[in-house]
């Protein structure tokens, strides 16, 4: 009997791997909006059975990155201008609630420390012209903001809307960059550190309004930093 043992990856691991690959392909545009996703074709391309692919698609449906249409199949959504506005309406509502709760509960210093760290990473990435990293840290900033509220329900609701945000943003490029991007995030963090709720909410709203305008200017609804 051989001393070497073959360890078979559990089905859940395959499903997670397929989910990550599909998520990345949707966000970076490899799978274009409107693309139909076939379980059979995906299973063949990933070298797995249809079970993990089915699980992956269900996860992505829950995240809002793909949509299931009865009697038609599963598709990468084509977002309209109204969809983009609705996503940012939901984000503003959730993130504003997080800001109010953070400040009201005295959690501002710890929250601001986390946010400042991500602002620094954004700034360093911007200087290095690593726009994909800038976009990633941008989304991590907003995720950390909501996480700092310590509200499980806010975080659960936000996890869906931030995934939909990735769908409409795509991969950040230099052409999408705004000169005030890092500055706006720094102002949000500073207002939270100072416990200035009104200022934090005002900068947050301006930030989202600017993003919606830029999204609308990029090939219809396109993609842009968060």
Image (cartoon, rainbow, N blue to C red):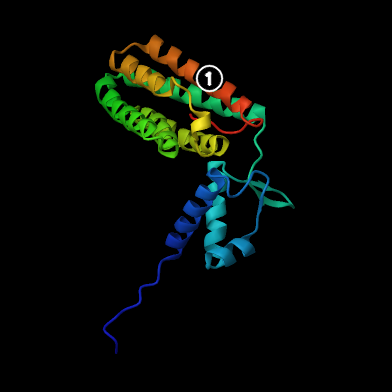
Q: Quadrant of residue 96?
A: top left
Q: Which residue is pictured at 50% across the width and 26% down the height?
A: 91
Name the foreground residue: 118 vs 153: 118
Q: Which residue is pictured at 65% across the width and 58% down the height?
A: 38
| Residue 151 in sight here | no
The x, y position of residue 148, in whole percent, is 33, 28
Secondary structure beneath label 1: helix
Q: Quadrant of residue 132?
A: top left
Residue farthest toward the right in the current orientation of the protein:
71
| Residue 204 in sight here | yes
The x, y position of residue 195, in whole percent, is 30, 13
* Left or right: 15 as drawn, with respect to 219: left
Q: Which residue is pictured at 51% across the width and 21% down the height?
A: 208
Vertical order, 37 against 67 (above or below): below
- Disc 1 crowd rating (10 Å Cα; few below 14, some 14-19, many 20+) is some
Name the foreground residue: 32 vs 109: 32
The x, y position of residue 123, in whole percent, is 35, 28
Q: Quadrant of residue 204?
A: top left
The x, y position of residue 219, in whole percent, is 65, 32
Name the foreground residue: 8 vs 132: 132
Q: Pointer 1: what residue?
A: 210
* Left or right: 189 as drawn, with respect to 161: left
């Amino acid at each position: 009997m051989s001393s070497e043992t073959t360890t078979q990856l559990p089905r859940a691991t395959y499903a997670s791997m397929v989910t990550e690959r599909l998520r990345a392909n949707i966000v970076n545009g490899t799978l274009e909006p409107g693309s139909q996703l076939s379980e059979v074709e995906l299973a063949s391309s990933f070298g797995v059975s249809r079970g993990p692919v089915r699980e992956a698609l269900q996860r992505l449906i829950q995240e809002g990155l793909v949509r299931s249409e009865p009697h038609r199949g599963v598709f990468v959504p084509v977002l309209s201008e109204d969809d983009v506005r609705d996503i940012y309406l939901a984000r503003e509502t959730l993130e504003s609630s997080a800001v109010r709760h953070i400040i009201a509960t005295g959690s501002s210093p710890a929250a601001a420390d986390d946010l400042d760290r991500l602002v620094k990473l954004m700034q360093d990435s911007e200087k290095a012209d690593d726009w994909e990293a800038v976009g990633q840290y941008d989304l991590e900033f907003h995720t950390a903001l909501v996480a700092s509220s310590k509200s499980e329900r806010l975080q659960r609701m936000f996890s869906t809307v931030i995934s939909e945000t990735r769908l409409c943003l795509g991969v950040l490029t230099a052409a999408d960059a705004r000169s005030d991007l890092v500055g706006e995030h720094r102002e949000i963090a500073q207002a939270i550190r100072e416990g200035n709720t009104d200022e934090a909410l005002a900068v947050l709203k301006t930030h989202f309004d600017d993003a919606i305008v830029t999204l609308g200017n990029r090939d219809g609804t396109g993609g842009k930093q968060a």
